[in-house]
Image (cartoon, helix red, strand yellow):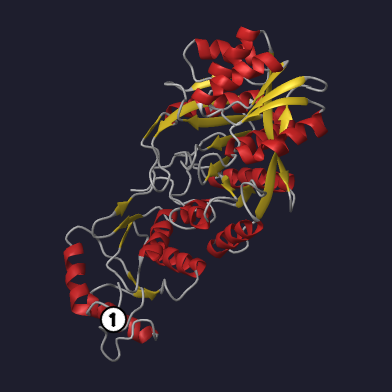
Amino acid sequence: MDGEHYPPVVAAAVRRLRAHHDVRGGIFAGGREKLRAGETGGGTVEALAGLATAIGVPWLDAVEPRAASPHEVLEGVRAALRAARAEVLVDLSDEPVVGYRERFLLMSAALAEGAAYVAADTEVRPQAFVRLEATPSLGVIGTGKRVGKTAVSGWLARRLDAVRRPNGGVVVLAMGRGGPPEPELIEGAGGLGPADLLAASRSGRHAASDCYEDAVLAGVTTVGCRRCGGGLAGAPFDDNLREALPLLDGRGAALAVIEGSGAVVPPILADATLCVAGAGQPADDVAGYLGTYRLLLSDALVLTQCEPPFATPAEIRAVTAAARAVKPGLEVLPTVFRPRPVRSVRGRRVAFFTTAPEGAAPRLAQTLAADHGAEVVLVSCDLADRRRLAAATARAAAEADVFLTEIKAAAVDLVVEAAAAADREVVFCDNEPIVLEGDLGAVVDRLAALAGDRFAARTAGGAADRRPSPSAGVAEAPP
C-alpha cells in the first residue's frame, strides 16, 4: 500500500481481502500526501505500527520502490514475504508511488518466493516446479532466442561429462518448439552423424531440435521434449517435461543438465542455474521486466555475442551494470562464439550455413580459414529462412566440397537433404564459447559442485523443503 491513498480507503480494501485471504502483513511503498501527522509510514517503527493498525494488518514493513535500488527493493519485498510465509502478494499501490517498472520488481520478488502477484486487473502465478529425486541438476536458462543458450549448454555438458563419465556421466534434458510428442532418449555417446539425423528427419522428427544438437555436438545422452508458448515469467503453455522425469532420474547419471528453450524456464527446478543472455539485447530484457526474475533464479550469467555486429562496448557495459543492479556480486562472464567443425575441413572447399546475422559472416569465414584451414566459398546466414536457404544450397552444390552447418532450424531437412542429393559431405559445426574475461570453465565446475552440494543437502532428510536456496529463489510447489 502507499501514502497516496487515505488509510481508511486502504482499510476498506483490506476488509474485502479478508473475505478470501488470511492477511498476514503488509509493505508500505512510500508516498505521504494522504497521511496525517504521525502516519508517516516510512518513518519510525511506531509510525509503521500505527499505520498498520489503521489499515487493519498485523504489521508493516517499509520498502520504497522509487527511492531504493532494484536490489534493495527485491530483498526488502522478499524478506517481508518470507516473514509472512505469504502465498500471494496483493498490490494496492498505484502511481505516482509505484509505476510500471516498479511493478515488475514486485512481480519478480513475489515469483522468486513462490508467491503469486495480484493487482486490480493483473495476476502472475509462479510455476509449479518439480525436482529430480535421484540426480543433482544444473539448469541453463536464457533471456531470449538466438542468444546461444544451446551452444553454452552443449559446451558445459561436454566438459562436465568428461570427468563424470566413470560415475554415470551427464544427461541433458532439452525442450524445444520442435521437440517430440513423447519424451525421446537419444544416445549421443556413440557418435551420431548426418546420416542418423537425416533418417530421423525423414521419419517425421525435427532432427535439428536442441536435443539432437546436444547429443551430436556434446556427445552425451539427451532427453528430448517439447513445449509450446511461454508466459511472462517463462512458464510454457504446454509441455511434456514431467513425462521425461523417469528417463532422467532412471539413468543413474552423475549430473542432469536441464536446458530451457528461448526465454522459457523448464518446470524442473534445478539445484544450481546458469543464465545465458545476449549482449545485444536491451538491458531491460535481461535485467528488467521479468528478466529480473530469471536473474534471481540464477547463480551466474554468461553474456554472449560480446562483439560487433551484435553489441557495442557501451551496450555490453549497460547490460552488465543492469544485471548487477538486480543482483550485486553476480558473476558475469562476457563471451564470443567461434565456429568449431566436429571433423577436419582443412584444405576443403566449404559452404557454411548459420543462423548468425550477415554482419558476422566475414569473421566466421576468417575463423574457419585461419583456425581450421578451410577454403570458405560461401557463408549463408539463411538457416532460419527456408526460401533463401534453398538458393544457398543450390550454390553450395555447385561450388563446395563440404556442407558445414550448425544444427539449427532447417539444417537437416534442407541442408543435409541438399548435400545428399548433390553427393556432398556434411560436417556439423559447433559454436564454441570463448570467454573474454574470467574463467568460464571454473565457473561451470563450481556450479556443478554447488548443484551436488545443494542436492545432498535437500535430500539428506528425505523430502525437500518447500522453498529452495535463496539464490534459486522459487518455491518447489507453489500453491
**Residue 341 on image: x %, y %:** 73, 26
Residue occupying the far bottom of the picture: 37
Name the one closer to the observer, 2 or 205: 205
Name the one closer to the observer, 369 or 31: 369
**Residue 467 on image: x %, y %:** 45, 52
On screen, residue 177 above or below 195: below
Lateral position of residue 94 relative to residue 404, left or right:
left
Question: Mark 1 Cα within 10 Å, few/some/many (few <14, many 20+)?
Answer: many
Identify the residue at image location x=47%, y=58%: 288
Mark 1: secondary structure: helix
Identify the residue at image location x=67%, y=52%: 333
- Report if residue 252 is visible in the image: no
Residue matched to label 1: 51
Q: Report the amino acid beneath label 1.
A: Leu
**Residue 356 on image: x %, y %:** 61, 36
On screen, residue 305 above or below 378: below
Identify the residue at image location x=39%, y=48%: 232
Q: Quadrant of the N terminus?
A: bottom left
- Report if residue 235 is visible in the image: yes
